[in-house]
Image (spheres, rainbow, N blue to C red):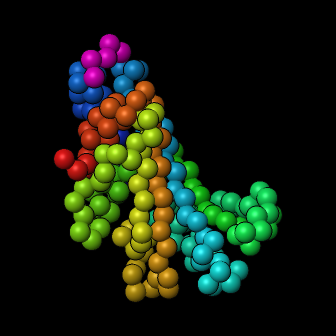
Amino acid sequence: MAELLDLKTRFEKEIIPALKKELKLKNNMQVPKVKMVKLNVGIGTYLKSHGKDFQPIVDSITAITGQKPVVNKARMSVSNFKLREGEPVGISVTLRGAKMYHFLNKLVNIVFPRVRDFRGISPKSFDGAGNYTIGFKEHTVFPEISPDEAMKTHGLQIIITTTAQDDEQGRALLTSMGFPFKK
């Protein structure tokens, strides 16, 4: 919990005044902040190869986030994908507050250095409204997952939603929080 307080207090004491000056904002409330972090895992190909049991993916996402994920089901049938209405298609978790800051701190300080051949994250993954998306091909880069015990690796998508007005504000926010963007 100490590292969580470090990121939150560092954000309040150092990052907000620096961003306010850098972005030439008049009020602290105008400074962009992180609203939530969402993790998504698609389980369609996993179900085709392993049958109906997707509990290992639920367990791994629970270990990574510290929160039980929601199983997303198909809203309608699509015959080309052999998908029926009500079948599970994905797993998602939304993090806010203390768990969000803890996850972001872990992502920047532990997970990115563990990625093989890591040269920084792409500055092009912003959506135009200051939100950022990161994709991982393997979930074993997270310290809670033992690569020896993982039966099958799966990818996951992380979406960081901010209150930024545009991509420049979002990039400034994430850079000040320690995200290693490519130059």
Q: Tell me where residue 112 appears, x and y as whole percent.
A: 29, 61
Position of residue 127 relative to residue 169, above or below, is below
Left or right of 99 in this view: 16: left
The part of the image, by quadrant, that contains residue 143 is bottom left
Q: Residue at x 52, y 66 (%)?
A: 61
Identify which residue, 71 or 11, lies in the foreground.
71
Left or right of 41 in this view: 10: left
The part of the image, by quadrant, that contains residue 44 is bottom right
Identify which residue, 17 or 151, lies in the foreground.
151
Q: Residue at x 39, y 20 (%)?
A: 30
The part of the image, by quadrant, that contains residue 110 is bottom left
Question: Is 24 within the magenta?
Answer: yes
Q: Residue at x 59, y 58 (%)?
A: 92
Residue at the front extreme of this rendering: 80
**Residue 30 visible from this viewpoint:** yes
Left or right of 47 in this view: 178: left
Q: Tell me where residue 38 appears, x and y as whole percent.
A: 52, 51
**Magenta part mainly helix, strand or loop?**
loop
Identify which residue, 20 or 172, lies in the foreground.
172
Position of residue 47 relative to residue 65, above or below, is below
Position of residue 17 relative to residue 155, above or below, is above
Question: Is 95 within the magenta?
Answer: no
Q: Residue at x 56, y 50 (%)?
A: 94
**Residue 144 visible from this viewpoint:** no
Residue at the left extreme of this rendering: 183
Q: Tell me where residue 138 appears, x and y as whole percent.
A: 42, 72
Q: Tell me where residue 130 appears, x and y as whole percent.
A: 42, 35
Left or right of 118 in this view: 136: right
- Count numbered badges in the picture: 0
User: What span is in magenta?
Assistant: 23-27
